[in-house]
Image (cartoon, grey):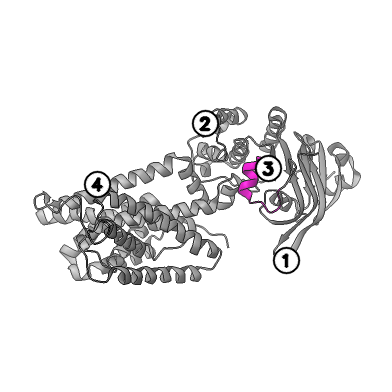
Amino acid sequence: MDLFIEQTVSGLATGAIYACLALAVVMIYQAIDHFNFAQGEMAMFSTYIAWYLMDDAGLGLPFWVAFVACIVLSFIGGAAIERIVFAPISDAPVLSHIIVFIALFSMFNSLAGFLFDFTPKNFETPFGHTPFIDGVISSHRVGMIAVTLILLGLIYAFFRFTPIGLAMRAAAASPESARLVGVRVGFMLALGWGLAASVGAVAGMLIAPITFLTPDMMLGTLLYGFAGAVVGGLTSPLGAVIGGFMVGILENWMGTFVVGSQLKLTVALVLIIVVLLVKPAGLLGRVVVKRV
Amino acid sequence: MALLEIKGLKAYYGQIEALHGFDLELEEGEITAVLGANGAGKTTTLRAICGMVKAGGAITVEGENVVGMSTESIVAKHKIAHVPEGRGTFVRVSTEENLRLGAFTRRDREIEKDYERVYHYFPRLKERRSQQAGTLSGGEQQMLAVGRALMLRPKIMLLDEPSFGLAPIITEELFDILGQINKEEGVAMLVVEQNANLALAISKNAYLLETGNVAMMGPADQIMNDEQVRKSYLGY
């Protein structure tokens, strides 16, 4: 029973990370109808930037200063990627997008290794690794959950209550109508990419103290994030968040009680396939009908 | 000088020329109808005015040529509200958020007050204010589209087939309200309509388009009484 509670609670903590990545993926999916395969690598690269900002070998800034600076830099980077790379190919077929995603993926992966080398690095946590509740959850994992919930709350409030958030939703849902009320759709897309990159950066900075910082740290995590997004429904940001948490818990249950930790990642992939076969719209997504 | 002056308007879809260079004018505070069969270029004309198709010639609004300007700039700068064919409401957000989006380019402090103005013309929208726009009936969505256009405090409203898909009684109600808005708010309107009778009834002038050219133009009552127009477009 203790093991069950421990696994469930720590599943919530990693689930928080998957929720962030799932949200980032869905935000971009809603705007451009494609999965950003490079979302994880962008997050990984952001985490390296944070490491550089706070490590003594880099600038040696305090954690929270580096945290905020990393979010801002990731935002600018994400928006720049949209403007420079994706805006010019917005009308291109799916395959072109996929190739650009793969290119970005390997560019960020190699660039991180080239700039910061491939040896795993320790990533600081401001929460410490002491037990928060003995045998159940550590202080860092509590911090992960708390920071994620604050972030998700802020993003919800932004989209729900601010005119810019509303305009971003409008631009993603019906770009032509958005232009007709004077919304600069291109600008809103860039904002969306920036936000998604920032959310990914937070996910990276929260998971790095557990996984260590390496150029490949986000490979598995992104797959779980994808699984979360698919489970929740690709058209629903809230669904993606819930899906992320569910995948985190499920991963731990399956890994501990059913398939063993070797096959944990397979769980995510099986989940993606099963959901797509049985209920393609996911938990909260709506069925999309396309006019052809 | 007219509020909106179009000279030698051409429009292209790729290589194909859809409009062949005609003139059109809209005076301040007036309603002008644009009639014609399917494919005559009515929708294309409206889309050209707000920069949504590649256009040639000159489209002058308040003395400035807007050909080549982005849609967003034309909307923001010249207060042109386009109510597109099929309404173009944002179905996944609420009625009131749709109205808020209509005022997106405004920076003044009277936006809150203008919700009430819209609700004055369309009381039913007030009942539906927090409902998702996609759950509204066709008539309500059309009213929402006009209400959203009003939120811009437009100088010009471009209305593309406002009667599309609506029951006759709703259409008549809508055109009554459009006439009322024109009088009370002083908004000039360019109305594209299949239902020529209704459009001519509230218009001062009318243009008849045929395959990308103006076939006839004049005061609405004259057009309405023209034998050929009556036979071809009014059906009696």
Quarter of the image with the C terminus of chain B is: top right
Q: Name the residue under label 4.
A: A146
Task: Please report contact status of discs 1 and 3: CB closer than 8 Å, yes or no.
Answer: no
Task: Tell me the element at label 2.
Answer: helix
Residue B203 colored in magenta in the image: no
| Measured Cα–Cα span from mark 1 to mark 3 | 30 Å
Dot 4 amino acid type: Ala
Residue corresponding to mark 2? B127
- Mark 3 touches mark 2? (CB < 8 Å): no
Mark 3 falls within which chain? Answer: B
Q: How many labels does the image show?
A: 4
Specify the amino acid type for callout 1. Answer: Gln
x, y (%) of residue B37?
78, 52
3 or 4: mark nearer the eye: 4
The residue at 52%/46% (across/down) is B91
| Residue A30 locus on image (x, y percent) | 46, 55
Q: Is residue B74 magenta?
A: yes
**Mark whose residue sits in front, 1 or 3:** 1
